[in-house]
Amino acid sequence: MKLIANLFLVTVIILTSCAKKTNSTFQASAIIEGTAIKVAVQTGGYLLKVNFDEGQEVVTGDTLAVVDAEKLSYQLDQIRAGLDEVAVQHRLANTSLRRAQEDYDYAKTRYERFRDLFAKNAASQQALDDAKIANDRAGTALESARQSLQTIASKEKGLDAQTKFLQRQINDAMVKAPMSGTVATRFYDAGETIPPNAPIIEIIDLKKMWAKVYVSETYLPQIRLGQNAQVTIDGATQTLTGTISWISAKAEFTPKNILTPESRTALVYAVKVTVDNPDRLLKHGMPVSIMLQPGS
C-alpha cells in the first residue's frame, strides 16, 4: 500500500508539472517590421523632380516623382501620324476591295452565261475562253485586294500597339505611390538620370506592423489565429496588444539569427503577430518582446 501511495504521489507531481508547462507563458524577442515597398521607375531618363523627402507621409496615388518624357511624346506623335496615314490607306483598300468584288461578280455571271450558251451551241469556244480568262483575272484581283486590306490592317494593329506602349511609358514617367505610408529612403534626387526599373523611393507602412516568433511543437497547440499577444518595447513601459495573424503549416529549423546552443537542431513553427500602430510608437527594425499566453 505504501508503494502504491508513493507511485500515486509521483504521478500527481508529474501531471502537475506537465500542466504548469502546458499553461506556461511563451516569451521571445523579435524584430518588428512594417510592409516595405521599393517603388521603381519603369521609364528611365532624366529625373525632373522628386516630390517627397524622407520621413514624409504619402497617400496611395500621390505623384512621388516625374521623369522627363518629352522624347517619348515626340515618338508618340510620329506613330499617331503614321496611324492617320494608314487610316487613309485602309479606306482606299476597302474601296478597291469593293470594286474588285463587283468586277468578280460581273465576270463570274458573264462566264456562267457563256458556259450555258456554249452548252446550247449558241456561243463560240473563243467567247467562252475569253469569259473564263476574265473571270480568273477578276478572282485574282479580288484575292489581291483582300490581301492588301489584311496587310494594312496588320500594320494598323502594329502601330496601335506601339501607341499604347509609348503611352504607357509616358504614364509611367509619373511615378505614383502604390500604397500609403512613410518615405523611408529616397534613392535619387532631381537632376539625376536613372535607369529603367531602378527604385527611387522606399515606402514603409507604419500603421500596421508585424513580427515573427518561433514556437516549438509542444507549445503550438496552445495558440490559435486571432489570439492576442502582448508586445513590449525594450526600455519602455507601454505594452501594445497584437494579434496572431498567421501560423506556419510546416516545421523548420530554428533560424540562425535567434539560435541558442541548446536549440541548434530544434524544429519550430513560425508565428506572425500583427500590431496596430496608429501613434507610430513602433519603428521598422525595432527590437521588441512578444508574450503569448494560452487562452488569451
Image (cartoon, helix red, strand yellow):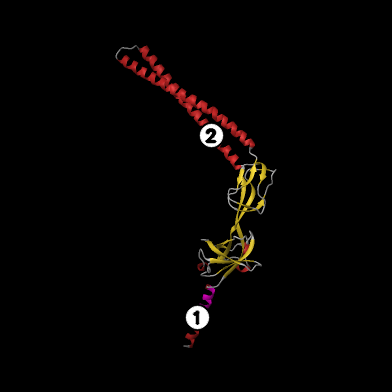
- Residue 23's x, y, as percent? 53, 73
Determine contact: label 2, label 1, CB under 8 Å: no
Q: Which residue is mark 1?
A: 12
Residue nearer the viewer, 85 or 211: 85
What segment is highlighted magenta in the picture? 13-21
Does the magenta run of residues contain 81? Answer: no
29 above or below 17?
above
> For residue 70, what is the image quadrant?
top right
In this rendering, the label closer to the viewer, 2 or 1: 2
Q: Which residue is mark 2?
A: 160
Left or right position of 144 against 236: left
The residue most toward the right is 191
- Residue 246's x, y, as percent? 53, 61
> For residue 236, what is the image quadrant?
bottom right
Please report whichever mark, 2 or 1, sits nearer to the chain's N-terminal start: 1
Q: Amino acid at mark 1?
A: Val
Q: Secondary structure at mark 1?
A: helix
Query: What residue is shown at x 57% (from left), y 38% (from top)?
Result: 167
Would you say the magenta stretch is mainly helix, strand or loop?
Answer: helix
Q: Secondary structure at mark 2?
A: helix
Q: Amino acid at mark 2?
A: Asp
8 above or below 185?
below
Residue nearer the viewer, 158 or 276: 276
84 above or below 22?
above
Left or right position of 40 against 146: right
Left or right position of 108 against 294: left
Query: What residue is shown at x 54% (from left), y 30% (from top)?
Result: 83
